[in-house]
């Protein structure tokens, strides 16, 4: 069942004719794990690692500087 | 007082060097006014035979009022272990001089030259303040300072988020500015200066230099339906100033044998010249993210395309699936794929007689693999428990960097692997108080 919903979800962006919800329909979206960056602390650790090992940075947020590692 | 779980209502939480500007267009619960909400995490990163890093971080957020909050974050970053200096391997042992100029180190035959003196500790402090400007508009101001033995970074940022369409759509605009100063041990090398034996005069210019980084970001977050949302960001980053890595060198080899030229026979010092990069770089990034609830599970997919005026472009694909195994536990597999092209001045080595002369500032070259053609893979798994007022998680991830070999190699370099794979393991633990 989850697999079917998973596959359907991949096409849901284009399938939606009306985007958005009413305020009382936000109970799922309001869950912490549905936040776009639900773990900012660990995201920052990951970003810093990749910043120092690859030629790209940022995207989700500012690319910035801040370290002599790159 | 019973402590409520926070949902990060803040538009931005200052991060160590890369400030997130992810808008949260929803919040399940509010933190109690006046309470501090504290999160902590620690990362252990280790590469096979190379760098290790230990990075603890703690953050605290206080809800000053219903529409105002402050966030503080402290990061420590301890690095140690050898790092590739950029020179090619050889069938003979090679000697190099350490950045200080006082000592040397030797690389065995057929081994990638690694500078084993790499050791540094970084401390970073971030603060941000968020305030509602109107019922639909929020402003976040941030500042950060990051300091290590030879590097200092100071940064400021401002982000405005505006909701429309019954808060189903959020527009985000942000700017940030950073000024970084580098002051390496031994001073900054002269472009394409030849490394000299330890204890003798090295080709140095000044003691320190700096660079500025200016970023702008525009984003749109859209709620699709009661289970899903997506985000699209465009960001532009302009860096000016000293962008060279003062510790990286490029080998000078014989055009027939491929053997490094011997600069000093007494110490067996190979001839290497210091790299030189352009003094400006403009990067463009487009980032998209899609998140969907699937009967309690969460699908999280993102893609980033980056290109710059160094002729580097990259694709980053990130996939996470948070599998809810009970009301309080979850497993989350993670896959990340990254691919980049090489900078237009990427040069694995120079043929003797063809390298730019010392002080040739208007010619650029680097052999740093991080600016070469590369594909990286991350595979990880996280387990977490989440309760009403606290939670924790632990994750382990493997990270592999697969770097492309030069298509043309001469002499003994044909038998050598100039850019061997780099593999790393990351262990991360986070606790939400």
Image (tube, coloured by chain):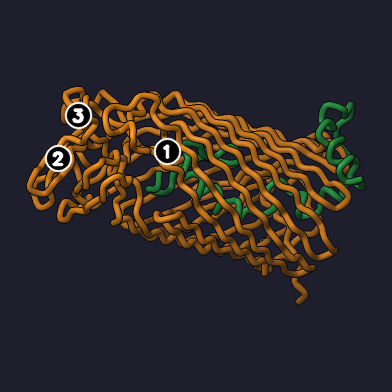
Chain colours: A green, B orange
Q: Are marks 3 and 1 on the same chain?
A: yes
Q: Are marks 3 and 1 in contact (CB under 8 Å)?
A: no
* Quarter-of-image position of residue B244: top left
Q: Please tell me whether mark 2 sits on a helix, a strand or a loop.
A: loop
Q: Are marks 2 and 3 in contact (CB under 8 Å)?
A: no
- Residue B431 vertical position relative to residue B311 in the rendered view, above or below: below
Q: Please tell me whether mark 3 sits on a helix, a strand or a loop.
A: loop
| Other residues around mark 3 within 10 Å, as few (<14) / some (14–19) / many (≥20) | some
Q: CA distance from mark 2 to mark 1?
A: 24 Å
Residue B370: which numbered mark, if any? 1
Q: Earlier in the sequence, mark 2 or mark 3?
A: 2
Residue that badge 3 annotates: B254
**B39 or B203, which lies in front?**
B203
- Whole-percent x and y of residue B59? 58, 62
Q: Are marks 2 and 3 on the same chain?
A: yes
Q: Earlier in the sequence, mark 3 or mark 1?
A: 3
Residue that badge 2 annotates: B203
Quarter of the rendering occupied by the C terminus of chain B:
bottom right
Q: Left or right: where does residue B49 sit relative to residue B247? A: right
Q: Left or right: where does residue B182 sit relative to residue B356? A: right
- Residue A41 vertical position relative to residue B318 in the rendered view, above or below: below
Q: CA distance from mark 2 to mark 3?
A: 22 Å
- Whole-percent x and y of residue B332? 72, 54
- Residue B352 vertical position relative to residue B17 in the rendered view, above or below: above
Q: Residue at x 88, y 46 (%)?
A: A2
| Other residues around mark 2 within 10 Å, as few (<14) / some (14–19) / many (≥20) | many
Q: Please tell me whether mark 1 sits on a helix, a strand or a loop.
A: helix
Q: Left or right: where does residue B343 sit relative to residue A56? A: left
* Quarter-of-image position of residue B137: top right
**B184 or B94, which lies in front?**
B94
């Amino acid at each position: 069942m989850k697999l079917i919903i998973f596959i359907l979800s991949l096409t849901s962006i284009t399938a939606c004719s009306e985007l958005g919800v009413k305020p009382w329909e936000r109970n799922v979206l309001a869950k912490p794990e549905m936040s776009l960056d639900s773990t900012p602390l660990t995201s920052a650790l990951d970003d810093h690692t990749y910043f120092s090992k690859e030629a790209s940075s940022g995207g989700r947020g500012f690319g910035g500087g801040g370290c002599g590692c790159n | 007082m019973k402590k409520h779980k926070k949902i990060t209502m803040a538009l931005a939480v200052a991060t160590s060097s890369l400030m997130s500007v992810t808008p949260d267009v929803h919040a399940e619960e509010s933190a109690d006014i006046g309470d501090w909400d504290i999160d902590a995490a620690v990362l252990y990163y280790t590469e096979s035979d190379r760098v290790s890093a230990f990075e603890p971080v703690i953050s605290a957020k206080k809800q000053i009022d219903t529409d105002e909050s402050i966030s503080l974050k402290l990061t420590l970053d301890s690095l140690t272990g050898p790092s590739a200096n950029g020179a090619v391997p050889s069938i003979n042992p090679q000697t190099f001089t350490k950045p200080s100029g006082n000592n040397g180190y030797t690389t065995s035959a057929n081994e990638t030259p690694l500078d084993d003196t790499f050791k540094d500790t970084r401390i970073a402090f971030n603060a941000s303040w968020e305030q509602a400007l109107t019922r639909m508009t929020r402003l976040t101001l941030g500042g950060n300072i990051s300091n290590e033995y030879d590097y200092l970074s100071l940064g400021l940022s401002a982000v405005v988020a505006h909701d429309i369409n019954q808060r189903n759509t959020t527009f985000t605009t942000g700017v940030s500015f950073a000024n970084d100063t580098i002051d390496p041990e031994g001073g900054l090398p002269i472009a394409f200066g030849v490394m000299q034996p330890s204890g003798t005069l090295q080709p140095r210019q000044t003691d320190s230099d700096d660079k500025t980084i200016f970023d702008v970001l525009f984003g749109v977050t859209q709620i699709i339906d009661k289970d899903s949302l997506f985000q699209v960001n465009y960001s532009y980053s302009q860096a000016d100033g000293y962008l060279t890595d003062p510790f990286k060198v490029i080998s000078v080899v014989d055009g027939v044998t491929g053997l490094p030229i011997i600069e000093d026979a007494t110490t067996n010092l190979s001839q290497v010249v210091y790299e030189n990069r352009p003094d400006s770089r403009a990067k463009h990034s487009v980032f998209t993210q899609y998140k969907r609830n699937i009967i309690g599970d969460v699908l999280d997919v993102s893609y980033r395309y980056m290109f710059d005026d160094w002729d580097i472009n990259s694709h980053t694909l990130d996939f996470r699936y948070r599998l809810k195994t009970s009301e309080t536990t979850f497993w989350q597999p993670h896959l990340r794929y990254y691919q980049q092209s090489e900078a237009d001045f990427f040069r694995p080595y120079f043929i003797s007689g063809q390298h730019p002369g010392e002080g040739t500032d208007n010619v650029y070259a680097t052999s740093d693999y991080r600016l070469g053609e590369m594909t990286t893979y991350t595979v990880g798994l996280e387990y977490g428990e989440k309760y009403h007022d606290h939670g924790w998680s632990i994750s382990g991830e493997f990270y592999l960097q697969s770097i492309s070999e030069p298509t043309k190699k001469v002499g003994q370099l044909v038998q050598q692997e100039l850019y061997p794979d780099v593999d790393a393991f990351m262990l991360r633990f986070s606790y939400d108080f």
